[in-house]
Image: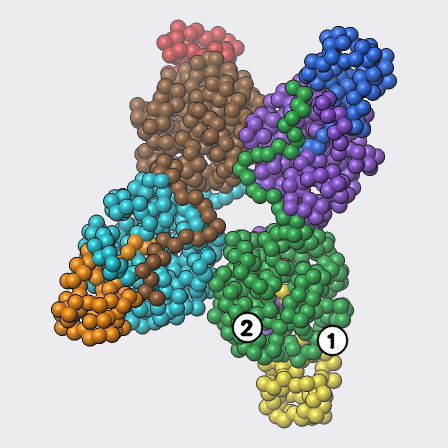
Chain colours: A red, B blue, C orange, D yellow, E purple, F green, G brown, H cyan
Amino acid sequence: MEIRINGNDVTIPENLTTIQDVINHYQFKSPIIIVEHNDHILKKEDYDQTKLKPGDHIEFVQFVGGG
Amino acid sequence: MEIRINGNDVTIPENLTTIQDVINHYQFKSPIIIVEHNDHILKKEDYDQTKLKPGDHIEFVQFVGGG
Amino acid sequence: MEIRINGNDVTIPENLTTIQDVINHYQFKSPIIIVEHNDHILKKEDYDQTKLKPGDHIEFVQFVGGG
Amino acid sequence: MEIRINGNDVTIPENLTTIQDVINHYQFKSPIIIVEHNDHILKKEDYDQTKLKPGDHIEFVQFVGGG
Amino acid sequence: MLKIGKYTFNSRLFLGTGKFPNFDIQKEAVLQSETDVLTFAVRRMDIFDPQQPNFLEKIDLKRYKFLPNTAGAKTAEEAVRIAKLADASGICHMVKVEIIGCDKTLLPDPVETLKATEMLLAEGFTVLPYTSDDVVLARKLEELGAHAIMPGASPIGSGQGIINPLNLHYIIEQSSVPVIVDAGIGSPKDASYAMELGADGVLLNTAVSGAGCPVKMAEAMKLAVKSGRLGYEAGRIPKKTIATASSPADGLLV
Amino acid sequence: MLKIGKYTFNSRLFLGTGKFPNFDIQKEAVLQSETDVLTFAVRRMDIFDPQQPNFLEKIDLKRYKFLPNTAGAKTAEEAVRIAKLADASGICHMVKVEIIGCDKTLLPDPVETLKATEMLLAEGFTVLPYTSDDVVLARKLEELGAHAIMPGASPIGSGQGIINPLNLHYIIEQSSVPVIVDAGIGSPKDASYAMELGADGVLLNTAVSGAGCPVKMAEAMKLAVKSGRLGYEAGRIPKKTIATASSPADGLLV
Amino acid sequence: MLKIGKYTFNSRLFLGTGKFPNFDIQKEAVLQSETDVLTFAVRRMDIFDPQQPNFLEKIDLKRYKFLPNTAGAKTAEEAVRIAKLADASGICHMVKVEIIGCDKTLLPDPVETLKATEMLLAEGFTVLPYTSDDVVLARKLEELGAHAIMPGASPIGSGQGIINPLNLHYIIEQSSVPVIVDAGIGSPKDASYAMELGADGVLLNTAVSGAGCPVKMAEAMKLAVKSGRLGYEAGRIPKKTIATASSPADGLLV
Amino acid sequence: MLKIGKYTFNSRLFLGTGKFPNFDIQKEAVLQSETDVLTFAVRRMDIFDPQQPNFLEKIDLKRYKFLPNTAGAKTAEEAVRIAKLADASGICHMVKVEIIGCDKTLLPDPVETLKATEMLLAEGFTVLPYTSDDVVLARKLEELGAHAIMPGASPIGSGQGIINPLNLHYIIEQSSVPVIVDAGIGSPKDASYAMELGADGVLLNTAVSGAGCPVKMAEAMKLAVKSGRLGYEAGRIPKKTIATASSPADGLLV
């Protein structure tokens, strides 16, 4: 399926149907992940109920060093 | 007639009926005078056509030293 | 006997014959005392052998707060 | 003749016998020249009476820009 | 040649007219300063003392460009009213937006200053806002269309001089309109310094009117502004922590 | 009117002659500065290039008072020899004792400077010692009979300006002979500042000769020195940490 | 004991987490600093390098209060979005409003900073705006309800220290909420100075992370902040231009 | 570990003992400062009040190294006499040459200080001369064999802090013996600054004894000296006129 992640157009495997699937897929190392789905910030508990459809845009956000 | 000038309630002689009359009355020494009549700034040429009525409020304004 | 101590002319009792006698006489409270006898700095052990004669000048010196 | 000028050993033509001769020889462009002959500062009027002998050391000094 | 809006000035020194010992000293100081621009305030007349002398009696009105300030205003609306009153006199050319946001420091209110600048520009005034040395605020004033930016060197009348040359440098560097350093100048070196930094002019008042001899100080400030400007144009030597001899190292006698 | 020994000067700016781009620019800068006193160094001629031009060719010798320095000397004896050589030229009036004690900072040697000053005074010279801003050292130089005291503002050629105004203030206050601030001046504000502190004059070189445009900077320095002197005579306003309005507090419209 | 909103801190040193040589040095520096508050930024993950290590892996999340900044935002709306994203992590406590208005100086945008502060307060955030040292702007931020004011000492990462102590003094004096001096601190004396002026805390980053030895500098800053605070509480001696002997004048031997 | 002559010290803070409110506060302040070195003066006893208490009663004589000063001396001879009297007490370790050359500024006499240093070294004393920040004078003192150089930051008791960091930097750079910044320190940031410049220690008195709370200020100074030393060892970031972001430029959300 064609979606937009962090500003990039990517094709994700068909077996990835929820936000949680995508997170599992990437295995982000960052201990803290924040997810914005179609301009809407998600709660952790909603990751696996949130279904993806083509054209969705997702932001995976983390904390980095800053002052 | 009772009017308000520069924040003071004053009674002016009955023979003063226009802004120009009041100016002549006070004989201000300042070379530059600006007049506000009931929140409306007057042009010089309107001074003698501008009739006064009781309760009018007038501001006679000048320039003073400042930085 | 007439001697000079710390810039003052003083008459000391006749029974005071040595520097040590004078120190005992004054019972200075300061834990540290330094003695100059006729422009000559004395060692502690010399206090009681040092005899006084009229006209001697003595400096009793101490440490005080300073920066 | 072998003499020392401004720290350099130089051989000057035999026809140069006085300080004035040497000055004329070099034709210094500087408007002001000061001459030290064997550690002795010369007056202008002595230039042509001052005879040179081998081994003399001479300093020709000028003013240069400085602060 | 300094150009602000449609006006050009030979002198880069703007002079305020407040608090001189008397009008004769003021007149003489104004002449000595050779300024082209005079600043003053707008106030009510005292109707109980209408014969009170006024400083303008001593001033040749044709000789100067007039820059009334909006001092006394605490809001943009009040500042606009004062500007319009001044304008109605028919003798003014520009307006100095001065909206104080703090009675103790007399520092300007950034929000009201932005608002007043915008309103007065819309009314067609030539607007010179007095502002703090906040660099981004200065840029916003320029973006609104202000005809010059007037950042303070330090608080009005404090004589502290230029406390933050870095911010003034940033403002001067970013501005395409003239920058007039306003407020806080205490002595000639301060005025010279402001000009060395590249300021287009200096506006001061107390440094002259409050000096022991205002007339002499007016001349001092005239020369200081010129010296700083010339120094800026000439290009100063860099600061170094290592010394460099001015006398040559060769030809030493010893 | 500045008086040093038996000489009087209209200008309070003394100018060094080192390191100008060329003699024509130097000549023009000297004229623009309107200085009365020129400083220079004493060096051996190059006998292998005797036609080398010399800066004095461009200078009207009758117009100035000459202040040769003893730069290059590391001891009092060397300084005295250089002073005598300069004197033998018949064109000099005074001597600047300059005995460097540190090649990196070019700061003066206090002990040799004292000694040289004493020796040259005994020889009848008009002596102006270049010294650090050590306050007691300055007093000792005056007690010896120095005709002026020339404390440095900062290291020679550094352009750091006045680093320690307090010491300069102390020296100026204690001195009954003229105090000429020498070395370290970088820009017009520095020269103006020195004069505001009450200095009787300023001696500078690199600030002008090393500027982008030496001629313009020479004029800038001339004006800066005048502005600072006038400011000193006029009496500056005190520095305050509280602001003071220049516009009146009464007659407010609002 | 420093109190901001509903949080209290033992340490008055807030530490940024940017640009450390590596995460181990950062971890050690954070420990040495004994800070209670860590600042960081919000950024997209790199989906092409998802295994990239993250500094938080090394940090005991329970030990600190977290102060994410809104760096990268140019408008109030962008700042609010970043703040909400940070908040959604569930680990944050406060937010540092950082809206840069100038890419060269990284100085803050006063208008957008005011707007973002108002919006975030309405959303219930504990808001600490990074601002310039504009005194009236600082007061307006406090009037909006900001939980602390964070004026810059000088530009971010410049290490210039406190350029305008007078404005900081004014802001500290007028504020009833804590004032944290943020940005520009270069060395321990700068941090100590900020605290001496009466600041409630100091936020710094580059001064530690960019130091030759960040761990040692972290300890230095910890001590500097304490020394400045103690000095402020103890009450410093006044500055005088006349010396005062520390040794007694009586009992002299000579 | 600071080493002067044959002595080594853990603390780099030397404390004077003058002008404390009372001996109990002094004792507590001395303890809080964790100093290893105490300075004091030599004076005549009052034979008309021999019971007068003395500050040493409260001090553990075994715990400290003692550095008597020669305050009161106006000549090298007087200083040597005072040093010998102090030495005769049997409790002293070093001597601080302090020969004041100006009653108003309390600045040292360079000539007498050199002379006294030479004489005391010949007598086998461990000599620490208090001197101005004259760079060449400091080198001459070291060349004589002084065990440490103690340049003043500003006049004694003035609290003006470090007026001329450049001279201190030069002195520190050129010295192979310890440099102790003495006199003028007003607040913790001043002490921290001296150490950042690379000084080996700080000697202060009035800044602590004259503070509102001397005990607290003593602790503040202890921390300030440590912070400055650590900062010096860690290596500070350079000062820049361009800002540098502490948050990363990539991964921006917008």
Look at 42% across and 19% down and name the residue there. G126
Are the residues under marks 1 and 2 on the same chain? no
Image quarter (top left, top right, bottom left or bottom right) of the N terminus of chain F? bottom right
Is F109 in front, or is H208? H208
Chain to which mark 2 belongs? F
Label 1 residue SS: loop
Label 2 residue SS: helix
Disc 2: CA contacts within 10 A as few (<14), some (14-19) or many (>=20): many
Question: Left or right of F178: which side holds E3?
Answer: right
Discs 1/2, front: 2
Q: Which quadrant would residue E142 be assigned to in this image?
A: top right
- Residue on which disc 2 sits: F117
Look at 75% across and 45% down and name the residue there. E32
Give the percent coordinates (x, y) of residue F216.
73, 53
Is A14 in front, or is G184? G184
Is residue E142 among the parts visible in the rendering? no
